[in-house]
Amino acid sequence: MLSLIGQTGRYAIQSTAGMGRIFLFLLSAFAWAFRPPPRLRLVVHHLRTIGVESLSVVILSGVFTGMVMGLQGYYSLRKFNAENFLGSAVALGILRELGPVLSAFMVTGRTGSAMAAEIASMKVTEQIDALYSMAINPIQYLISPRIIAGLISMPLLTAIFDVVAIYGAYLVGVELLGVSSGSYFAGMELSVVFKDVFSGFLKSVSFGLIITWICCYKGFNAPPMASGVGQATTESVVLCFVMILVWNYVMTSVML
Amino acid sequence: MIRVVDLHKTFGGQEVLRGINVEFETGKITTIIGGSGSGKTVLLKHLNALLLPDRGSVLVDGRDITKLGQSALNEVRQKFGMLFQSAALLDSMTIYDNVAFPLREKTKLKEKDIEQKANDSLAQVGLAGMGYKFPAEVSGGMKKRAGLARALVTQPEIMLFDEPTTGLDPLLGKSIHELIRRMHEKFRFTGVIVSHDIPEVFKFSDRVAMLANGVIIEAGKTEEFTASTNPMVKQFLQGETQGPISVL
């Protein structure tokens, strides 16, 4: 009985300490972001790796998500003779939920995993130690620029996903299934308010933070062995997916 | 001078260093030897605070670096250069950019001067004209030489070498040793080398220290060390499997 209490206590202490380390890591990254020298060139480099290089996969997933929504939305709404609401249904669903969440999933898979693997590999091959030995803070050099780039890239990618998905649904709903183009866009204009767009924007910014933060943390704290790279990559992707879903629920419930 | 006083370090319940006391004299090369897993690299990484001890201190020119804040520590670290076992070149950069990196980060030199210094440093280690290659495109020996060029480009007062010839064939190993000897003659840095390469490494070492069971069991001038009567030192130098050091 005593050992069970002991084990539970130990687990609780370790979990709390682990969470503390993750938050301290983020605080440290923000603190170093504002210390000289400015790392603008690195931020731009990571805007390319996180933003530009994720563009194709985000556009592709946006098109097909929109097309499926157009198809499903049409058959569901037709049961109630409400096909003309297709535009509203698609726009609200994509702007508030699917756009931010699915583009975050795509960026996690495309860039987050690579980020964790790259940093973990640098840890294993002593490149991070080499930065320390040259009196260069690796948090400032490796982590802060990635987090800033994630905060900027994610809302832009989400906006592109939203637009592409809405046109994907238009393609199926209007061009293939015959919903009126006017009612598709008019319904959207009537039902979508600023709050819907803004909530999606806030979600995408927070997802950008979650992805870069978790993936960088897992990579930076990877066990210093070859298997540590794989472990850090897997853990970062799984944890990002879970955190994105949980945080999406929290934000939806607060902003509804 | 670097002075290590009563240094203790434990990893996951295993006490690796159990009270290290040793001095590294200014301008001299000291080699640390010891069995695999005896804690030589751990000790080396304490010298520029890549690792912090559980107890004890590391005094660099009289300052205990284990108690310094981040910016003071960075100031002290600028006195150091380090050649890592894996060379630890940044693999996203070319060899040239790796060598120029500390100059770009830590000096206010113009790009033209940086280019001059980086190319000089590459030429000194025999890598002139190879700067455009990425670390993944060159051999282990070339990586080590590039790592040495990067470590020396800022002309540090103290150089740390973590098994500089591990994984290299005897000829390449000899060339790296020769390079270290020449660079030491030129820059007169304080050198600390962790190596298994006995007796090659003794040829240019001023002093030798042996680490066993978490403590320095013997330290002294190279010729005194090789004449030591300490049974553990004798067994290690002669490569005997029987003796006070248990091998298996």
Image: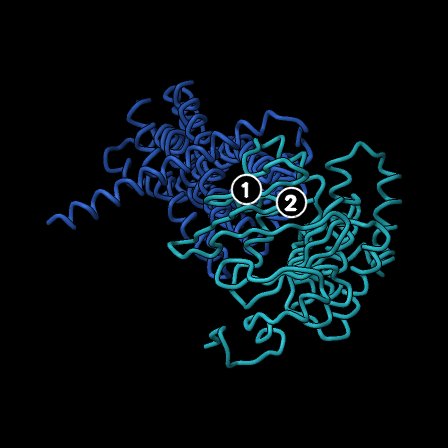
Chain colours: A blue, B cyan
Q: How many labels were placed on the picture?
A: 2
Within 10 Å of the Cα at label 1, are there few (<14), some (14-19), or many (20+) other Cα atoms? many
Neighbor class of circle 2 (other Cα within 10 Å; few <14, some 14-19, many 20+) is: many
Residue lying farthest to the front in this orientation: B229
Q: Please state the horizontal and vertical placement of residue A191, each as a whole percent of the image.
A: 36, 21
Query: Does dot 1 land on a helix, a strand or a loop?
Result: strand
Q: Which mark is residue A78?
A: none
Percent coordinates x, y for residue B185 in the rendering: 85, 55
Nearer the observer, B174 or B227:
B227
Q: Mark 2 lies on which chain?
A: A
**B88 and A252: which one is in front?**
B88
Q: Which residue is drawn at 85% across and 34% down?
A: B110
Identify the residue at horizontal 23%, vertical 33% (top origin): A80
Is residue B167 visible in the rendered image? The answer is no
Q: Position of residue A111 (x, y in %)?
A: 53, 46
Task: Name the kind of residue labelled 1 in the image.
Answer: Ser
Q: Position of residue B123 (x, y in %)?
A: 87, 56
- SS for tag 2? helix
Are circles 1 and 2 on residues that touch, CB within 8 Å? no
- Judged by depth in the image, the label closer to the viewer, 1 or 2, is 1
Q: In which quarter of the image is residue B176?
A: bottom right
Q: Mark 2 points at which residue?
A: A133
Residue B57: which disc?
1
Q: How far apart are the two marked residues, 1 and 2, measured between alpha carbons?
A: 18 Å
Q: Quadrant of residue A21?
A: top left
Q: In which quarter of the image is the C terminus of chain B?
A: bottom left
